[in-house]
Amino acid sequence: MSGTAEGSVKTAVSRPELPRYSWRDQSSGPTRIRITRYITNHLEADFELSRLAIGPLGFDLEWRPNYRKGGSENPVALVQLASLDTILLLHISAMSEFPLKLKEVLWDTLRVKTGVSIQRDCQKLYRDWGVSTRNCVELALLARSVDNARWKGKYTNPLGLSRLLETYVGFSLAKGKVQRSNWELRLSSVQQDYAANDAHAGYAIYTRLMALARDVPNTDPYYYSLSVVNGFVLDHLGISQWVPHNPYYDPGPPPPPKEPKESKERKKTPTWSAVSQATASSRSPFQDGIGMRNDGQGPLLASVPVAPALNSRAGTFHRIPRNRPTSTQRPQNHSYDPAQYSVTMRIQ
């Protein structure tokens, strides 16, 4: 991804196509992923979680989408965790009970849980399963804190996982239909790869950003870390109320003010005075509804164009048909007296 700051004018230059991210391609050398587990039993989950080394964890959740408009969300079905050498896909909706060790890992402040929109995920996990999560890092806030020169705009403006991955790791993230598949059924290999990539991408981004943080002064975990304890959003230690804020963040110049909606509507809808002036300026002698024949045989009824008539009730214009007379037809005799007949215009 290009380093264009958020909020700037988009250019017409297309970004180069980046290779797709895969956790398998990242597992080489000393960072080789040794354990990848798809787990549907809470006892097996407890065993694998007990083997996790202390360190940051990429964190993500999945749940079955609700295709009914206005319907409530389905509960969390899958918890994904990714460390230096391990990826665990914990299918909690298939388990007879929530793994006890998973509660401990989520509660442990020594284990950083990191992801995008992580506050929303942790709040949903508490609503659905009653589980609190501490020391969670929001990657968008971390990126704005340690790489302020690249990112501008409001501090809390979101940055997507794919965008951060392109910027700091050099890979794109595949989405597609699998994102909205059924996460409550037994997961296919495609779903497992998708879920593992999301969690491991969060871990990879976090490690790149923390490397940048070493050279950035005034970078306090309080600026980008939080906890959700009993449904309340607290600081990363789970002690006091937390609000996302960084006093050293520079949002850049403010965007240009938006044009008021009222002004836009006035431009689109002409006023009555404007319509009246336009009608008066463009009116011809034959648009008053009456014309005189050159042969002196009486009023011209059916052959002259007529100005639009105003509907006073609806405020709209209706054009009187040209070929239909607007008054009583003159008698079929040769003793026609023009003074006996007049043309009337009907105003609806």
Image (cartoon, grey):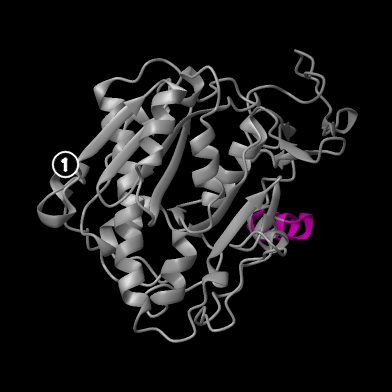
Q: Position of residue 22 (x, y in %)?
A: 20, 43
Inspect this view and state whether residue 284 appears.
no
Inspect this view and state whether residue 210 appears.
yes
Front residue (pair 333, 56): 56
Please identify the residue farthest to the left as the structure is shown.
29
Main SS type for the magenta part? helix
Q: Please name the residue shown 11% across and 50% down the image.
A: 28
Secondary structure under tag 1 reads helix
Q: Left or right of 171: which side holds 65?
A: right
Q: Residues within 10 Å of mark 1 (few under 14, many from 20)?
A: few
Q: Position of residue 9 (x, y in %)?
A: 39, 70
Front residue (pair 111, 280): 111
Q: Which residue is mark 1?
A: 24
Please identify the residue farthest to the top as the structure is shown.
332
Q: Which residues are magenta?
A: 271-284
Task: Name the image quarter holding the N terminus.
Answer: bottom left
Q: Left or right of 147: which side holds 192?
A: left
Looking at the rendered structure, the kind of residue marked 1 is Arg
Front residue (pair 174, 61): 61
Q: Please name the residue shown 10% across and 54% down the image.
A: 29
**Within the magenta stretch, is there residue 276?**
yes
Q: Position of residue 313 (x, y in %)?
A: 87, 35
